[in-house]
Amino acid sequence: MAALLVGTLAFQQRDDDAKITGDKQLEEYASTMDVALIVNLNNEGKGKDRLAFVLSFAVKDSFDQFIFEQQQHADLGQLLAIEVIDAFQRYASKTYTPESAVFAIDLFSRYVNYKVALSSEDIEVDLSMQSLSDVAFRLDERELLRRRFFNDREYHFLFSQDAETDNAALQRLKIAQEKTLDEAQRKALIMEQINNGSQSEKRAFRGTLDMHKIQQIKHDYVDSNTRYNAIAAEFGHEVAERFLKTWEGQKAWGQRVDKYKAYRKSLADGRMSDEEVAQALRQYETSHFNSNEIKRLRVLTQPPTS
């Protein structure tokens, strides 16, 4: 269930992107290609080909990538914040138009200082390990810190998607810690919350949602043909064939384990010494399982410790 609580979202391009420069909002549509052209921090513009720096949902990832690359190229240890800012100032002066470069440098500087403050004030959020009250407190503290460094417009493009994801994850954490529900109920509610979430969150949990749907098909249909047809209708024949082969293998393995358990039980009638029983089991194992299967078998069938 822990995997359902937290998702890591890559950059998601939204259909309603409103791109903003330092002092002017552009209401035109921002396609993925537009963003790649405008906020590509890996390629420096030259002379008259300089780009206008434009604030979009891609900027935060681009800033993080720039910081990471500067740290990777550092000769000695961790770079100071001022060194990273100086490097970006040199980069922006060569890459962006003079007017937009001023805004880009100012925004990047505040972003770096925000990250320094985030680290020094110890309000990084780990949604998978901390208590519910601790997570909620740290999310609130981080929200206040972000608002301290950025105006509403900047916050929207830099953090609104992250905040949406964090709030949804907090709700899943609340469900997961709800003691009045059993595990099946909690899992069902979490899946329902993801299904009713934003498109970006659905994309982030696409694999989880698909696996949940496939497992539901396995539960709802008993015979292989019906399962195959139901999976093929949703995900295609290749996926259906792969899962049926996996399930058939799991079923065959389960039958072999059951036979082993039955054989072991038949030896426990008191007519053989412990040493003879152990020898008989070893012979059965080597006759019916390979070395890797024997390791797995012993883990599955070892008696519970008191």
Image (spheres, rainbow, N blue to C red):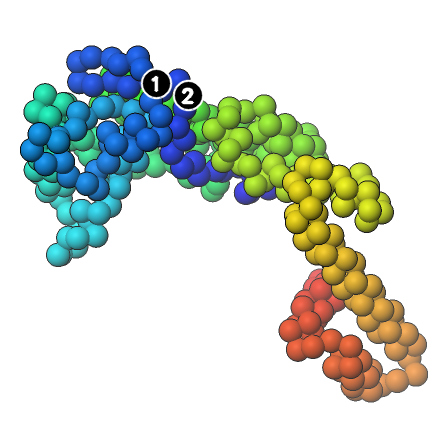
Specify whether residue 106 is in view.
no
- In this figure, which residue is indicated by the disc labeled 2? 15
Give the secondary structure at mark 2: loop
- Which numbered tag is attached to residue 271? none
Q: For the N terminus, give its image quadrant.
A: top right
Q: Position of residue 72 (x, y in %)?
A: 21, 52
What residue is drawn where x is 17% and y is 13%? 23
Q: Which residue: 74% across, 52% down?
A: 244
Residue 9: % across, % down? 43, 36
- The crowding category of the residue bearing disc 2, from other C-alpha atoms within 10 Å (few below 14, some 14 to 19, many at least 20), is few
Query: Looking at the image, can residue 305 be seen?
Result: yes
Q: Position of residue 135 (x, y in %)?
A: 44, 32
Kindly indicate the quadrant of the structure image that contains residue 34: top left
In the foreground, 158 or 132: 158
Residue highlighted by disc 1: 29
Q: Are marks 2 and 1 in contact (CB under 8 Å)?
A: yes
Q: Nearer the viewer, residue 178 or 255?
A: 255
Q: Which of the marked residues, 2 or 1, is nearer the chain's N terminus?
A: 2
Viewed as shown, does residue 217 lie left or right of 207? right
Q: Quadrant of residue 260?
A: bottom right
The amino acid marked with disc number 2 is Asp
Q: At 91% across and 80% down in the image, what residue appears?
A: 270
Q: Quadrant of the C terminus?
A: bottom right
Q: Nearer the viewer, residue 56 or 63?
A: 56
- Residue type indicated by callout 1: Tyr
